[in-house]
Image: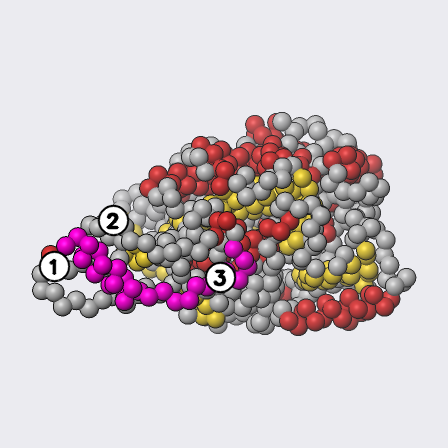
Amino acid sequence: MKHAKLNTLRASIRKINAPAEPHWPSRGTTALGSILTTTVVALGATPVIGAEQSLDRTVLPIPEPAPPVYTELDVRNATPPPRFEVKAPEGAPNVVIVLVDDLGFAGTSTFGGPVDTPTFDRAAAQGVRYNNFHTTAVSSPTRAAIKSGRNHHVNNMGGIIETGTAFPGNTGQIPDNVAPVAEILRYNGYSTAAFGKWHETAAWEASISGPLDRWPTKQGFDKFYGFLGGETNQWAPFIYDGTHPVTLPDDPDYHFLTDMTDQAVAWMKYQKALTPDKPFFVYFAPGATHAPHHVPKEWIERWKGKFDHGWDKLREQILERQIEKGIVPKGTQLAPKPKAIPDWDTLSADEKTLFAHQAAVFAGYVEMTDHEIGRVVAAIEEIGQLENTLIFFVYGDNGTSSEGGRNGMFSEMTYFNGVQEKVPDMLKVIDKWGGPETYPHMAAGWAVAFDTPYKWTKQVASDHGGTKVGMAVHWPKGIKSKGEQREQFHHVIDVAPTILEAAGLPEPKQVNGVPQRSMDGVSMVYSFDDTNAKERHVTQYFEMFGNRAIYHDGWFARTIHRAPWEMQPRRGLSEDIWELFDTRNDFSLLNDLSQDNPEKLAEMQDLFMQEAEKNMVLPIDDRVVERVNPALAGRPDLMGDRTSLTLAGGMTGMSENVFLNIKNKSKTITAEIEVAEGGGNGAIIVQGGRFGGWALYVKDGVPAYDYNFLGLERFTVAAKGKLKPGKSTIRFVFDYDGDGLGKGGLGTLFVNDEKVAEGRISRTQPIVFSADETADVGIDLATPVVEAIGSEAESHFTGNINKVTVEVMPVE
């Protein structure tokens, strides 16, 4: 009887789930990805289909077999079908991508830099480091490319999401035919989680109205804890757990970098506690070291006085260490600084004092970031998973940022609004630099130094200073080499195919019913244990805001179309001047060979156009400021042509991309509220925060309106008396002066149609209030627009807000 039941079970399995012909992974199999066969567990247990059986993993999700049809009346006489469950290939590694923000080639001690990065040092010493690893030169494009294995324009990420246009390649909407590696791994039996910065959701989709297709939890991640935009206030971030906003703790020592690390560590431990045999994929992407440079004082103190010698001497010291470590070839020389960067010796004493402290804050930020990454690695080791965890340490999504301009900034929002801060004013707050009361960035000279030995920085896709970053791969079980350097050219699009080969998985041909575009990247596995392996990534284009280049077999042709601090291009696209370099003999791109070898230059220019056409780079859009404006850029705008928006209490978390644009025009705000005795207290409606914004509020019963100009100047229009108990209608009217951007105007406050206050607002912000602060009704999330009202729970309105209408008047 026992054997009869077993034979019946076997026959049933064969009948209802006859396997297709075995599909061999397109990138080859490894010891970790052997083809598995179907077995039957002991009689009485429920067998599993998909764990030991050969599966066609090129179509995801893998379809579940049709259920059998039973004729037995009594369940006691029937045998259940095997449970269908897709598991990762036996022995598949855990995978972690660490992606640091805005840190260039010389940003770590591993690559000769001045800042101690012991976590990165250990990873490189126990694994392999790559000194020819490239990004796209800015954030969103690199992030989409590293997770999809396709070029950034193929992901529709020709620029950051806030500069999307109407043209394919630049829309900012990741298409369905470039499924990210997280989705591929999830469908193949991995647990997946992302922590930190996202910056890949189309600007107009980052609201509760969605669609949520390009939010992290619809891009392959079971878990997301982080922020959607390009940067966040580390002391007071606006963050999501999945799609739900997170309430910040009432903790004066709170810092997001530590919080996201705590979350990642807890998730990995929990996942392995419940399913120890199930591999995980973690995308760990700190907002650090992107501005604002927010770091606790104890990290800053360690670096005080260590940058007093300035950026010129620092570049020389870095290059000396790079040569000594073998990071760069002997004989490598420094590329000249951009002309806009002054020599350190020409600076005033005040400038030197301010700039040196800016670098100390940045160094503390880098060191803290490496420390938190170390906590993640330590947690992996603690749960016994380090041996079989493949970790990519990518210390920079682009070169170091020079967006701080010549002098750096107390508030980075001044850069985006065209306001130049002055050294004497910044010196007054030097002791607060890096703390909650600042939103700082450093002078551009330091960015050039942290990109040594190169000339340019972030945004410049046509220079290695903008694209090349320090990278190491650590995987004890899969990499025999220890502490060796790899010099083969590689790019962020190579990470995804490397993961698939290491896990023994094929590149899928179809995901969620959509045929997939093949990955552009090349697996790096071939180089893990072979220093002299022939380079496989032989051609790569670069383009960002008109800066463009092409790499092919060691040759590099490029044009510098504009510098990061230049709002307009240097010349027309067709008039650009191209240069030619042989990177095999010219590490720092010093010797332009275009005049000596015009035929090669022409060949490379032609190759660029071929790659540009193939990857949806054309037509090239070199606009910068204009692309921030949806109407000028041609991308969708959630508000469209609307001139009014009606909200109610509890509607919060609206970024500028999904809120009515009130800048550079007249506006009226009408709030219908109800208060008890005493007149109420708190925020009625706010937009922005400590470093720029506006608020209609009640303070101790007295209604008022504040305009906070970049955290530099504040204007208040307040009534003299308290609100009466019961219902009131508060109306604020702003009559814009017109005739240009960033002008002032007259503000008038009414209560129940009676004018109760009037005042001038001399200046307004023309472009943006904040990269991560929001518009909120009934509370002020993150940092306060009005310090006296506060933020988070402290700012909660104590009455009822029935309706708030914001109206704008077109500029005549």
Tag 3 or tag 2, which sits nearer the N-term?
3
Tag 1 or tag 3, which sits nearer the N-term?
3
* Mark 2 → mark 3, Cα distance in angstroms: 29 Å
Of residues 617 and 171, the one nearer the viewer is: 617
Of residues 693 and 435, the one nearer the viewer is: 435
Residue picked out by circle 1: 77
* Mark 1 → mark 2, Cα distance in angstroms: 18 Å
Q: Which residues are magenta?
A: 1-29
Q: Amino acid at mark 2?
A: Ala
Question: What residue appears at the point 34 percent right and 47 percent down from the top-left corner?
Answer: 797
Crowd class of label 1 (few under 14; some 14 to 19; many from 20; radius 10 Å):
few
Q: Is residue 273 magenta?
A: no
Question: What residue appears at the point 37 percent right and 54 percent down from the top-left corner?
Answer: 52
* Mark 3 → mark 1, Cα distance in angstroms: 39 Å
Q: Secondary structure at mark 2?
A: loop
* Label ID, residue 42: 2
Q: Secondary structure at mark 3?
A: loop
* Label ID, residue 24: 3
Of residues 227 and 652, the one nearer the viewer is: 227
Residue 570 x, y percent position in the rendering: 77, 62
Of residues 86 and 174, the one nearer the viewer is: 86
Question: What residue appears at the point 33 percent right and 42 percent down from the top-left corner?
Answer: 274
* Label ID, residue 296: none
Q: Amino acid at mark 1?
A: Asn
Q: Amino acid at mark 3?
A: Trp
Tag 2 or tag 1, which sits nearer the N-term?
2
